[in-house]
């Protein structure tokens, strides 16, 4: 990816990216490296981090394999950051099989909440002392079109992505006066490796016609990385507590 790179935009800065092995997270890592950041990249699939590391030609990349919903992974990521965190992109997330409220099983609910919400809380909690000490920092949480409406996923995922927006606004409220910004990006459909099978016939019947009519063309992961890195960078210094849809206009429908 070479277009629209801002050389040196993250020079001297350390960024943490979760879900870094694929899709939007990987594209965010590539963009941050191209713009001069030192990047701590974490993912639950070690082979994806190995592939990322093998493909990187410029910049300083450190990888940490582990489940981001586990505190031990958070601790390892913070250790790799070596006490400096200028930017945090909470990208890792999983889908929910599009299960409607009546069909949700406890395991799906708990896993979706753990990865999509609790992990963001834990990692943000861990980086905030470093950002407060520095008097600056930028956090971007990846929500979803499903954080804006009820017709883009199942109930667990929709709940989790609405929670990401509430978490983002509360964090922005408390910490913006201390120089720490917190924003969310709401992607529409993006071509990635995310697993999104329909596990409910009812959900397919209910969501199918709406999604076929309303969903704009699918975006690239690089387009999402563009929005995420803009919010991580000083180009958006006056923006905090915002939810930025990057969805080809879906949110306007
Ligand atoms: N692709 C879309 O259409 C779309 C739309 C809206 C929102 N999103 C959101 O964007 C984010 C990135 O999704 P993507 O489409 O790039 O998916 P992806 O599956 O291509 O990439 C996500 C990465 O996160 C990793 N991951 C999953 N669970 C993890 C865990 N517990 N710990 C650490 N890493 C973990 C995966 O291994 C994978 O490499 C997610 O939060 C997703 O909900 C995606």
Image (tube, rainbow, N blue to C red):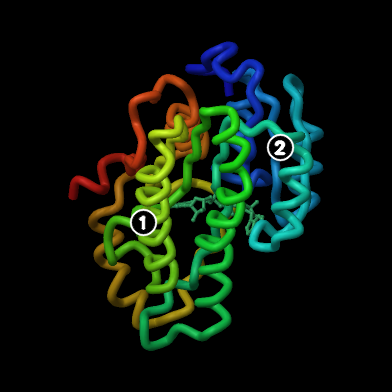
Question: Which callout, 2 or 1, points to the residue nearer the camera?
Answer: 1
Which residue is located at x 42 percent, y 20 percent?
A: 235
Q: Residue at x 30, y 46 (%)?
A: 216
Helix, strand or loop for disc 2: strand
**Circle 1 residues within 10 Å: few <14, some 14–19, many ≥20:** some
Q: CA distance from mark 2 to mark 1?
A: 26 Å
In the image shown, does 128 or 109 lie closer to the viewer? Answer: 128
Residue holding disc 1: 166
Label 2: which residue? 40
> On the image, which quarter does residue 108 sit in?
bottom right
Front residue of 23 and 10 = 10
Within 10 Å of disc 2 (Cα), the crowding (few <14, some 14-19, many 20+) is many
Which label belongs to residue 229? none
Look at the numbered disc 1 and give the secondary structure of its residue: helix
Q: Is residue 69 above or below residue 220?
A: below
**Image location of residue 184, percent across then percent down:** 40, 44
**Residue 203, how many percent across, how many down?**
35, 77
Do tag 2 and tag 1 residues touch (Cβ < 8 Å)? no
Instruction: Identify the residue shown where x is 64% and y is 18%.
Output: 36
Horizontal arrangement in the rendering, residue 61 relative to residue 1 (left or right): right
């Amino acid at each position: 990816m070479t277009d629209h790179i801002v050389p040196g935009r993250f020079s001297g800065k350390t960024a943490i990216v979760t879900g870094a092995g694929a899709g939007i997270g990987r594209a965010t890592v590539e963009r941050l490296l191209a713009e001069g950041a030192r990047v701590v990249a974490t993912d639950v699939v070690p082979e994806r981090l190995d592939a990322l590391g093998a493909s990187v030609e410029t910049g300083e990349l450190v990888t940490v394999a582990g489940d981001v919903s586990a505190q031990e992974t958070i601790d390892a990521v913070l250790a790799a950051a070596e006490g400096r965190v200028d930017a945090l992109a909470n990208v890792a997330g999983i889908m929910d099989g599009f299960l409607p409220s009546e069909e949700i099983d406890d395991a799906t609910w708990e896993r979706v909440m753990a990865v999509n919400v609790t992990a963001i809380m834990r990692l943000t909690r861990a980086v905030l002392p470093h950002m407060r000490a520095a008097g600056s920092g930028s956090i971007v949480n990846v929500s979803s079109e499903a954080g804006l409406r009820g017709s883009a996923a199942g109930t667990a995922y929709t709940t989790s992505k609405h929670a990401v927006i509430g978490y983002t606004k509360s964090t922005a409220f408390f910490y913006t006066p201390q120089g720490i910004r917190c924003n969310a990006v709401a992607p529409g459909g993006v071509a990635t490796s995310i697993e999104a099978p329909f596990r409910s016939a009812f959900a397919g019947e209910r969501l199918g016609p709406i999604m076929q009519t309303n969903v704009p063309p699918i975006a690239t992961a690089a387009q999402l990385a563009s929005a995420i890195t803009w919010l991580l960078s000083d180009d958006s210094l006056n923006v905090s507590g915002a939810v930025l849809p990057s969805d080809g206009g879906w949110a306007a429908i």
